[in-house]
Image (cartoon, rainbow, N blue to C red):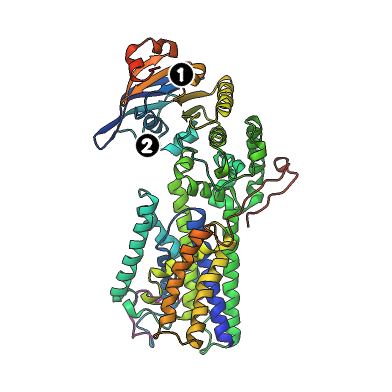
Amino acid sequence: MLVATDVHRHFEGMHAVDGVSLEVPRGQITGLIGPNGAGKSTFMAVLAGTMPATKGTVVFDGRDVTRIPAYRRARMGLVRTFQLSSEFARLTVLENLLVAAPRHRGESLLGALLGPGYWLADERRIVGEARRLLKRFGMSAKESDYAGNMSGGQKRLIEIMRALMLHPRCLLLDEPMSGVHPRVADEIQGYLQDLRRDGLTILMVEHELHFVEQLCDSVFVMAQGKLIGSGTMATLRRQQEIVDAYLVG
Amino acid sequence: MNTYYAANLLIFAGVDIIACIALNLQFGVSGIVNFAFIVFQAAGAYTAAVLSMPPDTAADYSFQIYFGGFNLPFPIPWIGGAVAGALLAVPIGLIVLRNLRSDYQAIALLVTSIIANTVINNARPWLNGAAGLALVPRPLNPIEPVPDSYLYFYIGLTAVCVALVWFIAARIVNSPFGRTLRAMRDQELAATALGKNPVALKMTMFIVGGAIAGLSGAILVGFLTFWAPSTWLYPETVILFAAVIVGGRGNNLGAVLGALLVPVGLEEVTRLLNNYVNIGPPNFIPAMEWVLIGLFILGFLWFRPEGVRPEGHKVFPEGFESGVRVLGDRD
């Protein structure tokens, strides 16, 4: 589904990502773990196109997307979330979801000038879709609140719902459990399992290893910009180099 | 209050309202810190002037030098002013909005404003340099001095333009397109990751705002009948920013209130105070106007950053998706 080959990302001589190659299989949840500063988020940004690769290729669903800008990769179904909350703070929760909906007739200048008569049917359709998502994620009661006023966990849910509004084929999640209350983290885990059952491909960076263990079909480990191992969590725990680099304890 | 003073006040208010709505679309809704805004108003004014004036070889006009002089009838100069503002936005936008971070965009636009004013001020063969253009024909060439009826007519024309600009701005702000612009303003990278092209969105609003600013310049020059670099120095942009911040960023009605409070209200209060109150050395009160504008901006940013009229909060009623309830607007 998503194949990275010899991906590099350099910053003024600092090799944040140094020749990483991996393949994310279709319909599975793949984990990407490693210590802080390993280059995981930079690698995710390169995959999503929000940061260009210095060298290497990214192929999504058989198509080389290395030189394709992030907004076009998102339209193709390769959608990412962010390590830090990136909600549209001065929009409501519902509006955050509506922004993400693709192919809306009112989303061009001409469409806007033609008025609601031109785009209202699309608006009704996506409001219905967004409300179904809010219900599924238990956030219907918050739809008219400003997204900036939500808790850390709710902001994470908004990001995931927002990404789902795009009907992604591959979701890149950057620490979805980070800063989230344990109860909400368990809920997010349940939602991610549901999404896998729906056939969605997910690549997830996560520090909470018990979530990785329960959720991920396979796991890649990064350290100092390089890929140092891959497999299930059980097999990784048996590799001394990886245990030393990251899995201590 | 005599008719000319009242007309002056109303037409300036109309021009400032149009300018503030345009700046609100760029800065308040889209997050573009356009410190060169006044350049687009000036482009509209100069274009309307050279489209409506006769060639500089004509009798009565030979004391000034300018290119063009097409002697075109109203409303072509006003349309030309709006088109000039839009066209100017294309090269500036392509240079500034594509690769620079937003704070650097603001700096680049401020520098653009200063360079443009300096060049026009010193290059006399183009637009008569520092002396500027005079005897710009008014729309429909009335007899001079203009009768009161013409002033009413001009107020009406300005009001029609205000209504047109309000309609366009309301359509943009209350649409899904406006929602996308606000999302880009709040989190540009996240909007990009959701399939939005921020450069295209910013360019669109830069051009739309440029066109509206150009129209405001055309209206102004048609009333003043002169235009010179001293009328569009970069601090004029600061006044408009103060108006949008005070009125309420992202809210069209806020932009209108801001225009009435800052450029119109503050300047008129200063003018009246200067006539009737004798404080300090000459020009003390007009100079204090700038102190007041600075305090206004700082005060609002500190105590009420959302402005007098904050950005709307859109609530979708129950049953909206099934067509039971209609859509409400933000303003």
Task: Specify whether A56 is left or right of A172.
Answer: left
Q: Considering only vertical position in the picture, is A89 above or below A239?
A: below
- Residue A170: horizontal and vertical position, in percent? 49, 27
Q: Considering only vertical position in the picture, is B255 above or below A181?
A: below
- On the image, which quarter does residue B153 sit in? bottom right
Q: Which mark is residue B182?
A: none
Q: Which residue is mark 1?
A: A25
Q: Which residues are magenta?
A: B61-74
- Residue B184: horizontal and vertical position, in percent? 49, 47
Q: Considering only vertical position in the picture, is B295 above or below B136?
A: above
Image point (33%, 66%), residue name? B114
- Depth order, front residue of B149/B53: B149
Crowd rating for badge 1 (residues with CA inside 10 Å; few <14, some 14–19, many 20+): some
Q: Quadrant of the N terminus of chain B?
A: bottom right
Residue lying farthest left? A13
Q: Which residue is mark 2?
A: A51
- Depth order, front residue of B79/A37: A37
| SS at badge 2 | loop
Q: Quadrant of the C terminus of chain B?
A: bottom right
